[in-house]
Amino acid sequence: LVLALSAWSGCDDASDPGPDGGLAATTGSLVGQVLSASSSGAFVAGATVSLGSQEVQTNEQGFFTLESVPGDVGSVIQIRAAGYAASTKTVTARDGQSTYLRFYLLAFDVQETLDAATGGTITAGGASVTFPANAFAATGALTVSLAVLSADSDQELQAFQGEFTTSNDELLESFGALAIEVTDADGDSVNLASGKTAAIVWVMKNDANAEVQLKAWRVLRARWRRGTGDKAEHERAA
């Protein structure tokens, strides 16, 4: 789940044609580097980078190469690494050339285990997520990971999903973002059960409006959309 306030949530809409807009007849290559969005800007080694059917790992300096990428059209690239929130970006390879890109990942602030039968609350960075009992489409011990992106940090903003625009090319004014991931004992993603909800409390800065629209991130389309709730009330920071 990815939420921005505007919030970062993982969902997809098959009616959206996506950023590709069709098939390209020619290709290029992507050479990228994955870094931490922390102040250290450390290399992220061993990250998994996926684009279509291709999947590669970053080396010790965080570098990777993807070949035969459709040229001059948008392609969706996904990056995952242990201890970091997954990232999805739309990238464009230059036709017949190598294109260099740099990607930043946001480290999780907290990773805790809870029992799906009893639920619980996970807290970090002025935000908390509460899952009621039997909220998940799974049983047993689950790992909940939470990352809080501060809109006041230029370094962390480099890990913001997308280009600060919606699928309708509307500009986003963001007060920050949350990344929430839930996995089972096998490391597979777990969703909320049908009809179940989780409660998110997020302390925002004083200059935010009394009501802020919630946006959710379409993982497979690499675009922001309106969240399931039209507005999100917030607590103002002291």
Image (cartoon, grey):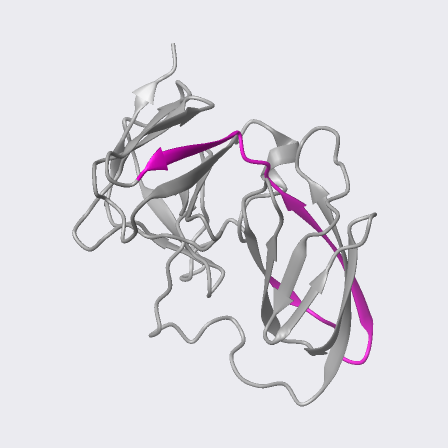
- Can you say whether 12 is above or below 1 in the image? below
- Can you say whether 128 is above or below 48 in the image? above
Along the viewing direction, whichever of 108 and 22 lies nearer the viewer: 108
Left or right position of 107 against 63? left
Which residues lie in the magenta part? 90-115
Residue 56 location in percent, x, y?
71, 65
Q: Is residue 132 visible?
A: yes
Please report the residue visible at 61 percent of the width from the left and 35 percent of the height from the top. 156
Q: Which residue is situated farthest in the left direction here?
A: 195
Assess whether residue 132 is covered by the magenta stretch. no
Left or right position of 29 against 49? right
The answer to which image quadrant residue 128 occupies is top left
Q: Main secondary structure of the magenta part?
A: strand
- Can you say whether 21 is above or below 154 in the image? below
Along the viewing direction, whichever of 234 and 200 lies nearer the viewer: 200
The answer to which image quadrant residue 30 occupies is bottom right
Left or right position of 101 against 217? right
Q: Which residue is situated farthest in the bottom direction here?
A: 25
Q: Please identify the quadrant where the C terminus is shown.
A: top left
Please report the residue visible at 42 percent of the width from the left and 38 percent of the height from the top. 144
